[in-house]
Image (tube, rainbow, N blue to C red):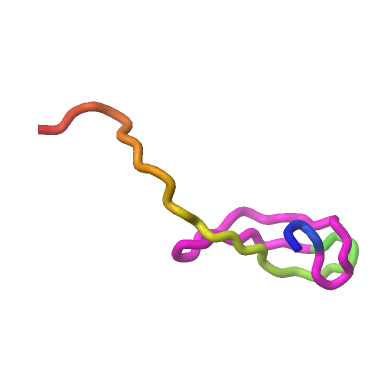
Amino acid sequence: MEGQCPKCKNWNLDYDEMEIEGNSVYYPWTCEDCGASGKEWYDLEFSEQELDEEGGE
């Protein structure tokens, strides 16, 4: 379950920086209660494209 340690079921996860892999991202985590560690995965989905400035010939 998102945000919960799968080993001890506590909600005390310490997250590292997000990593991108293909069309997914993951957050490495370590449980501050039992010391277990792993990755929490999320899928990326395209929503829109935006042009920052006018121009081009």
Residue 29 position, x and y percent, is: 72, 61
Outermost residue on the top side: it is 54
Nearest to the observer: residue 14 or residue 57: 57
**Location of residue 43 by image quarter:** bottom right
Outermost residue on the front side: it is 47
Residue 45 position, x and y percent, is: 47, 54
In the rendered image, residue 7 lying in the magenta stretch gets the answer yes
Chain part drawn in magenta: 5-30
Image position of 10 (left or right of 20): right
Q: How many labels sit on residues?
A: 0
Residue positioned 76% across, 63% down in the render: 1
Residue 21 versus residue 47 in the image, above or below: below
Which quarter of the image is occupied by the C terminus?
top left
Residue 36 position, x and y percent, is: 81, 70
Image position of 56 (left or right of 22): left
Residue 41 position, x and y percent, is: 61, 63
**Location of residue 27 by image quarter:** bottom right
Residue 35 versus residue 44 in the image, above or below: below
